[in-house]
Image (tube, rainbow, N blue to C red):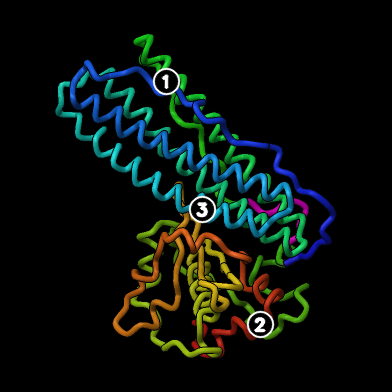
């Protein structure tokens, strides 16, 4: 990973996401039937919780702009947990929206609530991604890597911009419904999942096959060459990842020999060989005790999933049990795109699973 000298503030060009009350509550539907009362209540519950999330993310942004990166990451963790609670509230509301299809609800009202549900779900995705990138920006700022930090700050701005646009569309739909217009707006497209940081030259781009040769990567000669192999293509979906994980590892966990680092590196290698984008995540103070490594997989059009490699060290466990959506797995100190970045930062010996397993 290319290192850069910290050269000053990397301010997020947003002082606050939203102010409380910016989302219109909508008209009172109490007179239209009990099912409309239930829809209004569940939608309002989700919106009220969204205002709590906004306060937390504003705290994270303010901490980042004050260069208090530790506080920012704490705010990010809180935001992630609150967003998970929000997702549960939206899920309850979604169940009610789907169940009213057999109720005496007009097509017009049904289309309205379905359109608003799409936007409520988009809010969750926007918050999830902006928080994820803000946390990474903190980590890179602490490491003095302004290029990568600014890249993730830009991503935060894109996601917050999409969030603002979706808020506007939510309010526009309320106005349209009150005017009995069925021209309901859909969510804006989500920002792209992952792009290479700007102005950073990947040494592998100077080779015939990116990320498969060591040309230009001094000190990494102990990594097998080629490393990433061309295997059958899979996709970045939970089912495909689960298939690739199979039944976990056939080699047992061994501290300082074949532990979380080697396991995470092996999983990242296996997924990438099958065309599944994966990244190695690390945290220096996991659960306040020790350093830890795991894998994060950005999903197609969905949230990210994480893979806890050491689960497979438990007797009788399956690869599917390694997949997790626990918020703590999306708060990390470092995120590496490949084995080369991870080895440049921590050293090859931290990841050399190929000395314990056969590279096939």
Query: Alpha-carbon distance for marks 1 and 3?
Result: 30 Å
**Crowd around label 3: few <14 · some 14–19 · many ≥20 (10 Å):** some
State the mark number for residue 78.
Answer: 3
Q: Label 1 near label 2: C-beta < 8 Å? A: no
- List x then y, in percent, for residue 58: 60, 42
Where does label 1 land, which residue? 173
Main secondary structure type of the part rendered in magenta: loop
Where does label 2 land, which residue? 348
Which quadrant of the view contains residue 42?
top left
Q: Secondary structure at mark 1?
A: helix
Q: Which residues are magenta?
A: 195-203
- List x then y, in percent, for residue 274: 48, 66
Query: Alpha-carbon distance for marks 2 and 1?
Result: 54 Å
Query: Alpha-carbon distance for marks 2 and 3?
Result: 34 Å
Q: Residue furthest top?
A: 179
Q: Is residue 220 above or below residue 167?
A: below
Q: Is residue 235 magenta?
A: no
Q: Earlier in the sequence, mark 2 or mark 3?
A: 3
Residue mark closest to the camera, 2 vs 3? 3
Residue at (72%, 47%) from the top-left corner?
65
Residue at (35%, 17%) from the top-left corner?
27
- List x then y, in percent, for residue 91: 32, 43
């Amino acid at each position: 990973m290319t290192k850069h000298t910290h050269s000053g503030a990397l301010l997020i060009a947003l002082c606050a996401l939203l102010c409380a009350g910016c989302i219109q509550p909508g008209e009172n539907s109490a007179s239209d039937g009990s099912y409309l009362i239930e829809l209004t209540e569940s939608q309002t519950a989700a919106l009220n919780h969204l205002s709590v999330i906004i306060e937390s993310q504003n705290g994270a942004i303010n901490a980042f702009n004050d260069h208090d990166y530790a506080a920012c990451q704490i705010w990010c963790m809180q935001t992630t947990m609150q967003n998970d609670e929000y997702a549960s509230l939206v899920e309850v509301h979604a169940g009610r929206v789907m169940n009213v299809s057999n109720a005496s609800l007009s097509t017009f009202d049904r289309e309205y609530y379905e359109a608003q549900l799409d936007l409520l779900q988009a809010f969750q995705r926007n918050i999830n991604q902006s928080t994820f990138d803000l946390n990474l920006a903190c980590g890179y700022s602490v490491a003095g890597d302004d290029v990568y930090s600014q890249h993730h700050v830009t991503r935060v701005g894109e996601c917050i911009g999409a969030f603002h646009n979706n808020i506007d569309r939510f309010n526009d739909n309320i106005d349209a419904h009150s005017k009995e217009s069925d021209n309901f707006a859909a969510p804006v497209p989500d920002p792209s999942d992952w792009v290479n940081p700007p102005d950073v030259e990947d040494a592998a781009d100077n080779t015939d096959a990116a990320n498969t040769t060591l040309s230009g990567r001094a000190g990494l000669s102990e990594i097998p060459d080629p490393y990433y192999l061309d295997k059958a293509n899979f996709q970045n979906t939970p089912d495909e990842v689960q298939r690739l994980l199979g039944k976990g590892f056939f080699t047992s966990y061994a501290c300082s020999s074949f532990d979380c680092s080697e396991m995470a590196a092996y999983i990242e290698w296996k997924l990438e060989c099958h065309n599944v984008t994966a990244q190695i995540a690390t945290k220096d103070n996991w659960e306040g005790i020790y350093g830890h490594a795991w894998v994060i997989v950005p999903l197609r059009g969905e949230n990210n999933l994480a893979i806890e490699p050491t689960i497979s060290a438990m007797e009788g466990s399956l690869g599917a049990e390694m997949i997790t959506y626990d918020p703590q797995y999306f708060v990390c100190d470092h995120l590496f795109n490949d084995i080369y970045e991870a080895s440049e930062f921590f050293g090859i010996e931290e990841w050399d699973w190929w000395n314990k397993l056969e590279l096939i």
